[in-house]
Image (cartoon, helix red, strand yellow):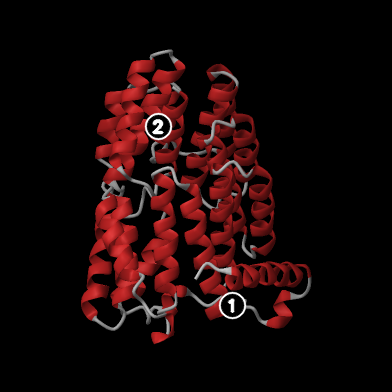
Amino acid sequence: MAGLGIRASLRVYWSLIALLSLTACSALQLEEPTVARSAGGADRPCARAVDLLERRETLSLDGRQLKAYAEACVARGDRPQLGWALLGRAEQYLGDRSASTVALNAALKADPDAGPGIWFAPILALDARATLFAAKGDPIGALNEIDVASGLLVRFTGVRYPELFSRLLSERAAYLALAGEEARAAADFERALLISRSAEQRFNVMRRAGWVELASGRFARAYRRLTQAYDRAPAVPQKLQNALRIYAAEAQGLDPETAERGLRRRLESGKLDLDLYPGLIIRFLLGEIDGETLRQRAREESRLNPAATKAQLDYYLGLRSLLAGETRQARAAFERVVESEVVALPEYFFARGALDRL
């Protein structure tokens, strides 16, 4: 499937979308239909699962609810492959890589020609399986999955889903960067930005570019990418998350004092509420609360994804230890993040990179 035909189609598609982005896209009525509608309507568990997955951040997404919808989607019988793909992604939020692999392999038995919305199942499954390859240190395997997913998107939808293609392309860029192909990665990130038609997707592309630089230890580049994304964050939780990751890049690339001053400036200019998660982590990094208080307050946040929250807390506890010269404690905290197997969380990859550098 990942042969020359698909790669040639991708080159043509990138060129076409770039041309359309520079001309009158609206005149061509490239209105992007919702994937949830393709999944069968708002009354179906499949559509509810897709909507939940598309609209929530990792930390606020309830992996248990997503899993329940996905299992109902499988049981319903008319779109079982889509249900398996959603279940595979849900298991990544819950920290079960083995179960995720089983579900995603089941999803890839789908025939995209089988009916409306079915084309999305193998694309979602390949996208999620790419995350698993990257999580075990195989960015080339991840690239192959994304290339096949992008080829299927071109084949079955043409130019109807530019935002989805932009997302796949930005993920491809991230895996290229992890593989050391920095020039090609930069070019793909630029293409992903060009294709994007919404401010939110452009924000997602820019922050993903920053994430991969942070995971790779290129802290100055991570800082530049993440600060570019900061003002484009669509809501307060995303601003707080981005502020955290800017701090992580600046503290490791320069020094903790400079990073703390920068963090305080952003908080003052943005009037951000630190009583909201992940504002609690920022208060911890600024020395306003201790680690135990941080854990207790996070446990009280019922709307959070518990597995992802614990993994993120462990990363920043480890970062604090690392900056204080406490290497043993930092290593233990980063190892807990990796052992969590919450591969949908950027801090999972930040922790892997930090362990490689210790």
Crowd tier of the residue under label 2, counting other residues whose Cα lies within 10 Å: few below 14, some 14–19, many 20 or above: many
Residue at x-position 44% and y-position 30% = 282
Crowd tier of the residue under label 1, counting other residues whose Cα lies within 10 Å: few below 14, some 14–19, many 20 or above: some
Give the residue pinned by disc 1. 160
Going by the picture, which residue comes out furthest to the left? 75
Tag 1, which secondary structure?
loop
Residue at x-position 57% and y-position 57% = 200
Residue 212: name its quadrant.
top right
93 lies left or right of 218: left
Q: Position of residue 53 (x, y in %)?
A: 39, 62
Residue at x-position 55% and y-position 29% = 263
Give the residue pinned by disc 2. 281
Quadrant of the frame with the C terminus? top left
Tag 2, which secondary structure?
helix
Q: Position of residue 134 (x, y in %)?
A: 44, 47
- Camera-side residue: 244 or 253? 253
- Camera-side residue: 8 or 13? 8
Q: Which mark is residue 95?
A: none
Residue 225: name its quadrant.
top right
Q: Position of residue 159 (x, y in %)?
A: 62, 76
Q: Earlier in the sequence, mark 2 or mark 1?
A: 1
147 lies left or right of 345: right
The answer to whether 120 is drawn above or below residue 353 in the figure is below
249 lies left or right of 100: right
